[in-house]
Amino acid sequence: MKITIGGVVKGGTSLAYKTGSWRDQRPLIDLDLCKACGICEEVCPDNSVYAEDEIYYIDYEYCKGCGLCAHECPVDAIEMVLEEK
Amino acid sequence: MLEQTMSNVKVVEGSEAVALAVKGCRPEVISAYPISPQTHIVEWLARMMANGEMDTEYVRVESEFSAASVISGSSAAGSRSYTASSSQGLLLMTEVLYCSAGMRLPFVITGVNRALSAPITIQIDHQDTISLRDSGVIQFYVESSQEVYDTHIAAFKIAEDPQILLPVMVCMDGWILTHSYERINFIEQEKIDSFLPPFRPANFLDVNNPKAWGSYSEENVLMEFKYSVQQAMQYGKKRITEIFAELARITGRDHGGLIEAYRTEDAEVILLAMGSVVGTIKEAVDELRSIGKKVGLVKIRCYRPFPHEDIWEAIKAAKVVAVMDANFSMGSEGALGMDLKSKLCGMRDTPLVFDFIAGLGGREINVKTVRRIVEKAEEMLNKGLPLSESYWVDLNPEILP
Ligand code: SF4
Ligand code: SF4
């Protein structure tokens, strides 16, 4: 693959960059505690939290394990656990 | 010779000459923040816009960082873009300028030279623009307002060359050029338009065809990206020379190529300098020549890319090169001196190079100063003094703490 002048690439290529490989802490949502407020989805810097029918999930392909979601969750529904690979 | 009509000759302020050159290049976006001694340039442009003479978006911002960011964005969107700044303002732009060069955004900046704080001053030297020399921005330095006018018109064409695509900074000494009046020959608009066609880059931001600039890169490609900027700089030397020559054919005014060699044939002592001080040096060279001294001058027009091949051709037969640096790299020496020495190192039978620090913070350089520099260079040549430290011209040791 050749580089381009100025590194100009097609839009949306960040999808190809799987930041999930960076993670050493894995966020786990306790759906019994979760109030579906959506704060975790808002604060995630990698757009790795998504909701389907008010149920919140984490996309581990991209979650880099920063812990922001766990820190910001108002009901402490997210726990960060050591990533094991 | 080209015929001169009175209608394209006018006495104007240097800042107005810049503004008229920029206007002639039909920029689509201008964003700037005022700072002395750059302010008149953007005031002239704002006035022209207010009078309906220009079809340009003028974005007022709260800082130079934003000014540079706005024109990076507009340049990526495919619009010919321009800004101007000075001193601390250029420093505040620095982060954006490195990014813009890496993203290969071809806007033009006027770098109005002024010293850097502290202590604060509005007097001139080249420390501000020299501190940007590693950024990937092409840098020209000019001697006169006529040259600054012509160089801005060439600058857009050079920046937008598809093999170059780099920001171009035209550096001009504050006050001495920006605020003095000079007789300027202007180029007719049709001639500018045929020399500089509209900016139509292959890549531009487009919602219908999304592209990204400045994506993340890692150890497998970053070196190649940096090297490709250096390749553009190297290619630029040839292309800049061609574009200057093309403009000279249109205007009938030849300011030289990457350098101007002035009375260097058979010269034993050659002064190397850039900026408005060059006019004074030419005067001194003429005086010294008239009393039989073999003295010449190399004026650097293009500082980045550094034209060492052309300099070498001009200096190779000399005994000594006296470099005049209006800047200083703290803990080392002047930038021009370092550049020249690094390129001569390892070559055979090179002239000696002495680095003179002159004109910092507006310290006057007149014909006598230049003559003292030549005398000092000859003295050091005869004594064979070591070369490692710069000589600070007219330094007053009495007032040192
Ligand atoms: S740990 Fe960080 S990256 Fe992962 S889901 Fe939470 S906020 Fe997003
Ligand atoms: S921040 Fe906590 S409570 Fe709110 S949606 Fe996320 S996990 Fe549920």
Image: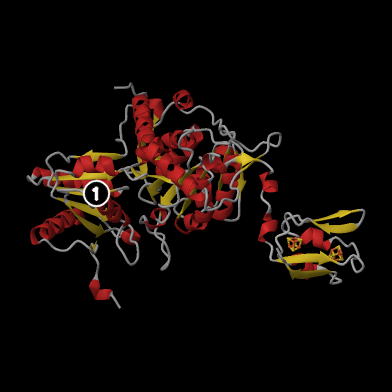
Label 1: element kind: strand
> Visible in this render: residue B176?
yes
- Image spot of residue A19 (x, y percent): 68, 55
From the image, which quarter does the N terminus of chain B lie in?
top left
10 Å crowding of disc 1: few (<14), some (14-19), many (20+) = many
Number of callouts: 1
**Mark 1 falls within which chain?**
B
- Image spot of residue B106 (x, y percent): 51, 40
Is B399 rendered above or below residue B353? below
Report which quarter residue B395 is drawn in: bottom left
Q: Is residue B363 left or right of residue B79?
A: left
Which residue in the rendered view is the most extreme toward the bottom?
A: B401
Front position in the image: A7 or B399: A7
The residue lying at 44 percent from left, 35 percent from top is B158
From the image, which quarter does the C terminus of chain B lie in?
bottom left
- Image spot of residue B175 (x, y percent): 38, 51
Report which quarter residue B155 is drawn in: top left
Is B394 rendered above or below residue B267? below
The residue lying at 45 percent from left, 44 percent from top is B229
- Image spot of residue B366 (x, y percent): 23, 54
Q: Is residue B113 left or right of residue A27?
A: left
Q: Is mark 1 within 8 Å of ligand 1?
A: no
Q: Is residue B303 left or right of residue B38?
A: left
**Residue pointed to by mark 1:** B272
Which residue in the rendered view is the most extreme toward the front?
A: A85
Dividing the image into four equal quarters, which quarter contains ligand 1? bottom right
Q: Is residue A24 left or right of residue B257?
A: right
Is B158 rendered above or below residue B221? above
> Visible in this render: residue B169?
no
Three-letter amino acid code at the position of disc 1 = Leu
Front position in the image: B160 or A69: A69
